Every structure is written in C-alpha cells, then in structure tokens.
Amino acid sequence: MRRPLHEQLYEQMRDRIRSGEWPEGERVPSEHSLIAEFGTSRGPIRQALATLRAEGAVDGGRGAPPRVRRLVPTQSFQSFVSFTDWARSIGRRPGQRVIEAARRPASETVADDLGVEPGAAIVEIVRLRLLDDEPAMLERSAFPFAVGKLLLAADLDTGSIYQTMQEHGCAPVRARHVFDAVPADDLDAAALAVSVSTPLLRVRRTAWAEDSSLVEVADDRYLPTMASFAVENTSDA
Ligand code: GLP
C-alpha cells in the first residue's frame, strides 16, 4: 500500500535535516517554496511540518518562522525491540563498545531484581551503544547465569544480545519499562562524554521469556539529544 503523501514528504524533510542539507539553526524553507519544490498542495506540506514539529525537529509556530533543530530519534514503546533493531528502524547504524561482561555473584539488589538468591551466579554486561558511531546510551544489563553464559560465549562486540537469545529460544517476549531521569554518574559521564550530573533519560527494563522466566533486567541511560520515547494509546473510556 502506498504511504500517504504527507508521510513521504515528512521522511524527505527529515532526511534533509539528518544529512545536514537543512542545517541546525537555519530557517526551514517557506511553505511557498516547499509547495513549488515538491509540486504538491499546501495540506500535505503543513502536515509534514507538523510531524517534524511534534518530534521537536523544527521549532517555531505561532507566527515565528520554523527553524531546524537537532533531530532526536524517537523510540516507540508500543512494543519493544532490541537496540540493534531500533537503530535500524530509524535508518541508523547500531554499534557498541563492551565496557564489562562478567560472571559474578548477585548482589542483594540484583538478586531481588532477577528473582535469584543473593550470591547466585549471574552475568552482568555493560555496553556503550552507538548510533552511527555517536554515543547514545549506556546499557547495564544483568542476566540469570543460564542465559548470561550463552551471551558470554557469543560475540558481544558486534552481535545483538537479543538475536543470540532468540537463537537459544530465550528471547524476551514480554517486558515492563519504567522511565525516569537520572544525573550521569562517573561511568555514564566517561562513556557518554558528558559532565557528571548531566541529566539522562533512563529506561529500566525487566523482561520475561515465553516460558515466563525472567531473563533480563536492564538500566539504559540515554543522552536526551539522542532519543525520545513515544507511546500511542487508546483511552479506556
Ligand atoms: C535494548 C534493551 C536492553 C537489551 C538490548 C539488546 O537496549 N533496553 O535491555 O539488552 O536492547 O540489544 P541488542 O540485541 O542490540 O544487543
């Protein structure tokens, strides 16, 4: 099915912002010139601009001329995907640097989160996640040993953790997400190349496999310039 015209226009405009063809801080070309250039009517152009505005990729409105802002990619939480799949879905190249990957005894907190006994073997993996080589998020994940050992045996530098879990039949199929903001600690700051205390967007995920076993708890800290989150819902009424 052909996508609506305003969506196609939106994507073309978004690509221009992304590529720098429309540079940050500059005025967006006037509606008049966009109509002439794209050879469409005013409606779809306005809708495309409204979508960019809702995403924060352009500002202005209420009479002020719209200007290009940095495009912050949105991650939908309608369903959940791995970082790798999210990056690809927004046309970015996913990347990672493994900061730590180790088997260790579960601390009291992690044991509570993972539902294992304190001191039980677990696997902790800390990775810096990149979008087109730019630091975007610091991910701290903990796994029960049965799952974690599969990951320690896999190529964490290039592979997708969820892909590996999928191959072993323990991919997460259900998750609970909690969103909040946290000040960057020393590790966040060093990895994400920001100052300590910079506000970060945090997503905490608890994920279960098909057989209802808890397979991951994660604490992901995103640079607010690199991600925003969206959920589309219907009302209960
Ligand atoms: C996201 C999730 C993490 C998960 C990761 C897997 O970042 N929030 O909980 O570990 O995706 O990513 P990938 O499959 O790309 O390694």
Image: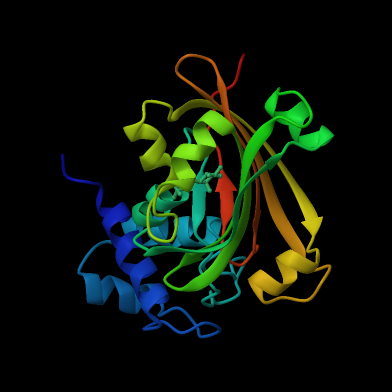
Q: The N terminus lies in which quarter of the figure?
A: top left
Question: Which corner quadrant of the image does residue 206 belong to?
Answer: top right
Left or right for 168, reference 194: left
**Residue 226, how many percent across, how many down?**
56, 64
Left or right for 98, reference 62: left
**Residue 100, how many percent across, how many down?**
61, 58
Residue 65 in view, yes or no = yes
Coloring scheme of the render?
rainbow
Depicted 83 relative to depicted 237: above or below: below
Q: Between 125 and 19, which is closer to the camera in this rendering?
A: 125
Residue at position x 38%, y 40% from top? 164
Residue at position x 48%, y 47% from top? 152
**Residue 138, how many percent across, how many down?**
62, 59
Residue at position x 35%, y 55% from top? 88
Residue at position x 59%, y 54% from top? 228
- Tally of numbered discs: 0
Left or right for 222, reference 17: right
Residue extending furthest toward the left? 1
Q: Between 178 and 45, which is closer to the camera in this rendering?
A: 178
Left or right for 58, reference 203: left
Q: Between 100 and 135, which is closer to the camera in this rendering?
A: 100
Residue 82 in view, yes or no = no
Q: The C terminus lies in which quarter of the figure?
A: top right
Depicted 47 relative to depicted 65: above or below: above
Depicted 205 relative to depicted 184: above or below: above
**Residue 168, how many percent across, how many down?**
36, 30
Depicted 146 relative to depicted 65: above or below: above
